[in-house]
Amino acid sequence: MLLFILVKNSLLKNHYYYVHGLTISSEINLPELIAVEEQVPDIWIKTGEVPDHLPIINGVGVLYEASQDDFLFRLDTVARYRVQDGKYITIEANEEATPEEVRLFLFGSAWGALLHQRKMLALHGSCVAKGKNGFLFVGPSAAGKSTLAAGFLKMGYSFVADDISVIGFDEGNGHLIYPGIPHLKLWRDVLLHLHECIDFERIRPRFEKYIKPIYTGKKLDPVRLENIILLSTKNTPGYHFKEISGSEKFNLLTQNTYRMQYLDKLNRIESHFRNLSRLVEVTKLFRVERPTSPLNIRELATFVEDNILKI
């Protein structure tokens, strides 16, 4: 019997969670998320059969097929995920996969498709806050987004999101970042640098990357987005920053959209560019270059705080 196939009967109650401004009703336990009381959900997660292919296909990519409101992600060693109408995710898991692996891709590719279906603006970045003001770190893989966020947490900032940062707009408060999954994904060398014990769960059995829980214990409020910091690396010592403007600003944020490759197949490019254009008009973007090595998290965080966050 496949992992996660649950016996459905009148005694079985779904689990309820909150993340990225959305309430989830799930047949499976999602221990990474903040649990909430039973309520009318925005999202339904269930187990069941997922087809080999979609009935209608707009386009295909590596491991996925998509049409406007239907998305299929297949990683046969782990699970198949079908995302429909921005509301429903169906999971058919491989019996050899661990629950942790199934949830990893649920809150990766499948969740990215769902956010795009809902026309929500999701950037590939991590966010911390000071009071009600949020600071977003974006950049390519290995740029140091989660690492920098971990450094700021050591300096007394609060956690908002890691890996996926979902941005909404409120007429009274401007752009808001909704709290994400309360954990950081950090490599072993980063944990050692921060003097953390290596006793966290690995993201996958053979990876030296770990999930560090951030113990909030309660549903968090969104924070107002102040600045966006784009991280990049260089092979020379020292740190450098500059403010980005004009078309370059728009293009760089487009490149840092979470699962950007899905937009065209999901017919969501127009809505995404509209959301991004509104963000670009009112939010400052700074590029920060850091040395590839050595790793000095506190020094980088202090540089960003002194030169950008205090502006």
Image: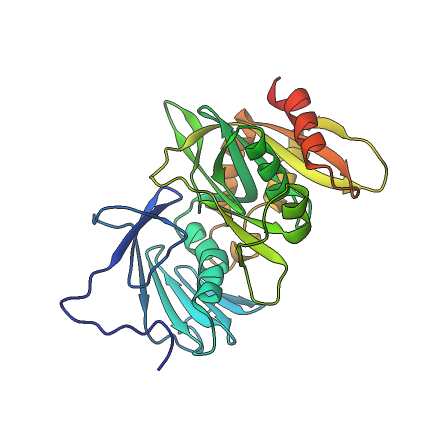
* Quadrant in the picture for residue 281: top right
Q: Where is residue 77 in the image (x, y as percent from the top left)?
A: 52, 76
Horizontally, residue 175 falls left or right of residue 299, namely left
Q: Position of residue 189 (x, y in %)?
A: 69, 50
The residue positioned farthest toward the top in the image shown: 311
Decide which of 295, 284 is in the foreground and name it.
Answer: 295
Residue 145 sits above or below residue 50 on the image: above
Can residue 285 be spotted in the picture? yes
Residue 243 sits above or below residue 11 on the image: above
The residue positioned farthest toward the bottom in the image shown: 1
* Quadrant in the picture for residue 235: top right
Colouring mode (rainbow / by chain / secondary structure / one colour): rainbow
Horizontally, residue 228 falls left or right of residue 158, namely right
Q: Please name the residue shown 38% across and 69% down the image.
A: 91
The residue positioned farthest toward the right in the image shown: 236
Q: On the rendered image, what quadrant is the C terminus found in?
A: top right
Q: On the rendered image, what quadrant is the N terminus found in?
A: bottom left
Horizontally, residue 37 falls left or right of residue 237, namely left
Q: Please name the residue shown 21% across and 49% down the image.
A: 38
Decide which of 37, 229 is in the foreground and name it.
Answer: 37
Decide which of 84, 299 is in the foreground and name it.
Answer: 299
Residue 299 sits above or below residue 264 on the image: above
Q: How many labels does the image show?
A: 0
Q: Please name the residue shown 53% across and 37% down the image.
A: 127
Can residue 259 be spotted in the picture? no
Residue 182 sits above or below residue 47 on the image: above
Horizontally, residue 306 falls left or right of residue 130, namely right
Q: Position of residue 80 (x, y in %)?
A: 44, 71
Decide which of 131, 154 is in the foreground and name it.
Answer: 154
Q: Please name the residue shown 68% across and 38% down the image.
A: 231
Q: Position of residue 63 (x, y in %)?
A: 55, 69
